[in-house]
Image (tube, grey):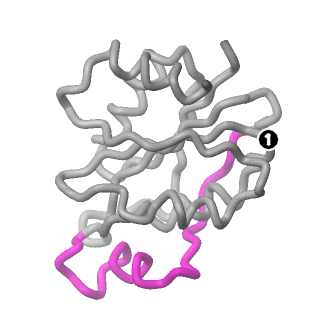
Amino acid sequence: MSKRLVAYFSASGVTKAAAERLAAAAGADIFEIKPVQPYTAADLNWMDKQSRSTLEMKDPAARPAIAGVPEDMSGYDTVFIGFPIWWYVAPAIIRTFVESCDLSGKTVALFATSGGSGFGKTTEGLRALCPSSVKWAGEKLIRGGVSDGELSAWADSVEK
């Protein structure tokens, strides 16, 4: 089995819980992607057209600053990147993360939490930001009813 990392951004704690379960099921290290400026409830109000998250999602150039990246990515073969789905795509902070880490030669799989929307064109958008040597191994929506066995099986499948 290769060395695995679960890196995640969580605005409300839902994705954090999913990431912790995935990391345990996959035998992976875990890293939280933290914004330099934490999101407030007002920032996350998607009904407010001027909220921080809404403005970031409308701007393809938005790259919210992150507090840091894992110290040494060279030891990881597989990286699971998790986030809540916002407007059918990953939050802008995920673009910052994938551009800030050296994912060259790694297998990358995406997982997300969502109240209803799917991945949309998330994978295509993130793939365009990464080196061509990244092996994209799929995506998974993680909802509350998923079993640890299912998470483990999915984690194993991305490396095949």
Question: Of the residues shown, which amino acid type is indicated by label 1?
Answer: Gly
- In this picture, which residue range is highlighted in magenta? 45-70
Residue indicated by mark 1: 105
Which quadrant holds the N terminus? top right
Say whether residue 53 is magenta. yes
As drawn, the residue found furthest toward the front would be 160
Rendering coords of residue 106 (x, y %): 73, 38
**Image-based side of 88 in relation to 63, left or right:** left
Rendering coords of residue 67 (x, y %): 61, 54
Dominant secondary-structure state across the stretch colored magenta: loop
Which residue is at the front of the view, 158 or 28? Answer: 158
| Above or below: residue 39 compared with residue 49 | above
Rendering coords of residue 124 (x, y %): 53, 63
Say whether residue 127 is magenta. no
**Res 108 → quadrant:** top right
Residue name at image x 55 percent, y 69 percent: 64
**Res 87 → quadrant:** bottom left
**Image-based side of 46 in relation to 125, left or right:** left
| Above or below: residue 14 compared with residue 30 | below
